[in-house]
Amino acid sequence: MDRLERVIDTRVPSDRSCAEQTSGVLDCIGVGESFVLVADHDPMGLHYMLQAERPGASSWELLEDGPPRWRVRIRKEKAPATR
């Protein structure tokens, strides 16, 4: 049986921003795991932020290029560096 992939739907009202939700999930999943981000706006700004703040830590696969809906698979590629 295939394992269900986690979906983070940022179109649902939340007290956390899209960036906060995405960073939180990336912190919780293991290397090699992924989730699908669903948004009602182009999330490329989030992609650039992840590249700048966590270089090489995740990969980005565009699944649906809206409008009205964007879907992206984000995979954790490596654990964050420790200081």
Image: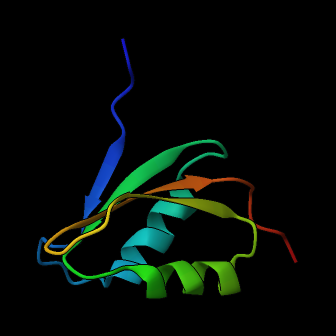
Left/right placement of residue 56 relative to residue 73 reads right
**Colour scheme of the rendered structure:** rainbow
Q: Is residue 52 above or below residue 9?
A: below
Residue 17 x %, y %: 31, 85
Q: Is residue 25 above or below residue 49?
A: above
Residue closer to the observer: 76 or 70: 70
Q: Quadrant of the N terminus?
A: top left
Residue 32 x %, y %: 64, 42
Left/right placement of residue 11 relative to residue 70 reads left
Q: Tell me the quarter of the picture where residue 2 sits.
A: top left
Residue closer to the observer: 37 or 16: 37
Residue closer to the observer: 35 or 30: 35
Q: Is residue 2 above or below residue 75?
A: above
Left/right placement of residue 55 relative to residue 66 reads right
Q: Quadrant of the C terminus?
A: bottom right
Residue at the (33%, 31%) spot, across then down: 4
Residue at the (46%, 61%) spot, across then down: 25
Residue at the (68%, 86%) spot, across then down: 52
Quick one: which residue is furthest to the right in this view?
A: 83
Q: Is residue 68 above or below residue 3?
A: below
Residue 3 x %, y %: 39, 25
